[in-house]
């Protein structure tokens, strides 16, 4: 489940970047009720894009902002409540890590869903049932 966080230079220290990514990972696991699931934990991956300040924009002008994009199979965080819970937790994590250098209203999040069968891990395509089976298999193996 790739997470992409984009922030301007100077927003987050190196240490804060590691902490924020761990926090976003934990937020996703918590909302999905999969904390401790080995399959899910190992497959939450992502990037932190740190861009020059003038390349992070809102309303056409540079702004101190953070953009969180989560890519998921279409069955994950399917309810409106689950999406809202993730967005709230993710904003909390980023806002806390920015230590006052970021207004909460400048944290934008979105979820991009992969359709049935368009999710791949290690060169293998998973349909929804196979994906759920892999998650459940990891839960019973621990």
Image (cartoon, rainbow, N blue to C red):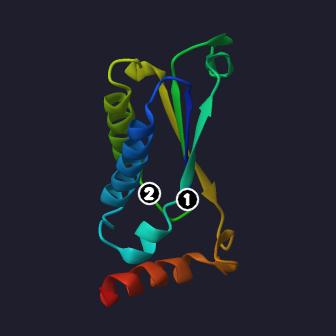
User: Which of labels 1 and 2 is toward the front?
Assistant: 1
Residue occupying image coordinates x 40% and y 18%:
101
* Residue 72 locus on image (x, y percent): 55, 59
Pick the front one: 77 or 8: 8
Residue tagged by mark 2? 77
| Callouts 1 and 2 close, C-beta under 8 Å | yes
Q: Tell me if mark 1 has few (under 14), some (14-19) or many (20+) residues whose alpha carbon lies within 10 angstroms of its own.
A: some
Pick the front one: 13 or 39: 13
Mark 1 → mark 2, Cα distance in angstroms: 8 Å
The answer to which image quadrant residue 59 occupies is: top right
Dot placed on the residue nearer the N-terminal end, 1 or 2: 1
Seen in the picture, residue 136 relative to 47 is either above or below; the reply is below
Residue occupying image coordinates x 70% and y 78%:
123
Seen in the picture, residue 62 relative to 91 is either above or below; the reply is above
| Label of residue 72 in the image | 1
* Residue 110 locus on image (x, y percent): 54, 41
The answer to which image quadrant residue 35 occupies is: bottom left
Residue occupying image coordinates x 50% and y 37%:
109
Residue occupying image coordinates x 35% and y 47%:
23
| Label of residue 138 in the image | none
Pick the front one: 5 or 118: 5
Locate the C terminus and report the quarter of the image it occupies. bottom left
Q: How many marks?
A: 2
SS class of the residue under badge 1?
strand
Q: Can you name the residue that lies furthest to the front here?
A: 14
SS class of the residue under badge 2?
loop
Q: Tell me if mark 2 has few (under 14), some (14-19) or many (20+) residues whose alpha carbon lies within 10 angstroms of its own.
A: some
* Residue 33 locus on image (x, y percent): 30, 64
């Amino acid at each position: 489940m790739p997470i992409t966080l984009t922030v301007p230079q100077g927003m987050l220290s190196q240490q804060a970047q590691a902490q924020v990514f761990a926090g976003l990972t934990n937020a996703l696991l918590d909302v999905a009720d999969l904390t401790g699931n080995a399959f899910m934990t190992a497959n939450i991956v992502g990037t932190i894009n740190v861009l020059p300040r003038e390349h992070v924009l809102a309303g056409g002008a540079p702004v101190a902002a953070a953009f969180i994009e989560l890519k998921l199979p279409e069955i994950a965080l399917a309810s409106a409540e689950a999406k809202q819970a993730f967005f709230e937790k993710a904003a909390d994590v980023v806002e806390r890590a920015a230590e006052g250098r970021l207004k909460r209203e400048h944290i934008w999040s979105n979820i991009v869903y992969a359709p049935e069968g368009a999710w791949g891990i290690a060169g293998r395509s998973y349909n929804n049932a196979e994906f759920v089976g892999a998650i459940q298999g990891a839960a019973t193996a621990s």
